[in-house]
Amino acid sequence: MAGSDVKAKRITSTGSAAVGPARIRQIQVLSTTGTPRLTVTDGNGGATVLDLDFLASDSHSVNIPAEGIRVSDIHVSALTAITAVTIFYN
């Protein structure tokens, strides 16, 4: 999968991105006021693979190094003070 095309999925609430097995390559976040936090797990109820805090009222871009984070399904389990997140994966 490392050599496959990169795709993107915009998420505005918690739950599955419904993309199946993937490698998370980059995340872009639009945060609101408060204490923005994003938590991504390996499928619903799986291990936490990414847990990030952000500055309020800004846009953020997080590049994932090397081959990215491998998951069975991208599941956003916490989306606090965040309007939307776009996840780039392959």
Image: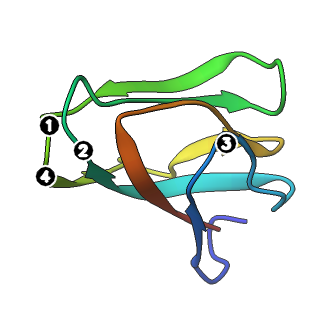
Taking the view exactly as shown, the residue that stands out farthest to the bottom is 5
Task: Give the number of marks.
Answer: 4
Provide residue 35's location: percent of width, then percent of height: 24, 23
For the residues bearing labels 4 and 1, Cβ distance under 8 angstroms: yes
* Secondary structure under the numbered disc 4 in the rendered image: loop
Q: What numbered label is drawn on residue 58?
A: 4
Q: Which mark is residue 74?
A: none
How dense is the environment of label 1, judged by Cα within 10 Å: few (below 14), some, or many (20 and up)?
A: some
How far apart marks 2 and 1 lie (CA) works out to: 5 Å
- Residue that numbered label 1 is attached to: 56
- CA gap, disc 2 to disc 3? 28 Å
Q: Earlier in the sequence, mark 1 or mark 3?
A: 1
Which residue was labeled with disc 2?
A: 32
Q: Which of 64 and 2 is in front in this view?
A: 64
Q: Distance of mark 4 from mark 1, alpha carbons?
A: 6 Å
Query: Mark 3 Cα within 10 Å, few/some/many (few <14, many 20+)?
Result: some
Quarter of the image where one finds residue 30: bottom left
Gap between marks 4 and 3 measured at Cα: 27 Å
Residue at x 73% of width, y 65% of height: 1
Tell me whether the residue at label 2 lies in contact with that at label 3, contact meaning CB atoms closer than 8 angstroms: no
Q: Tell me what residue is drawn at x 56 percent, y 56 percent.
A: 12
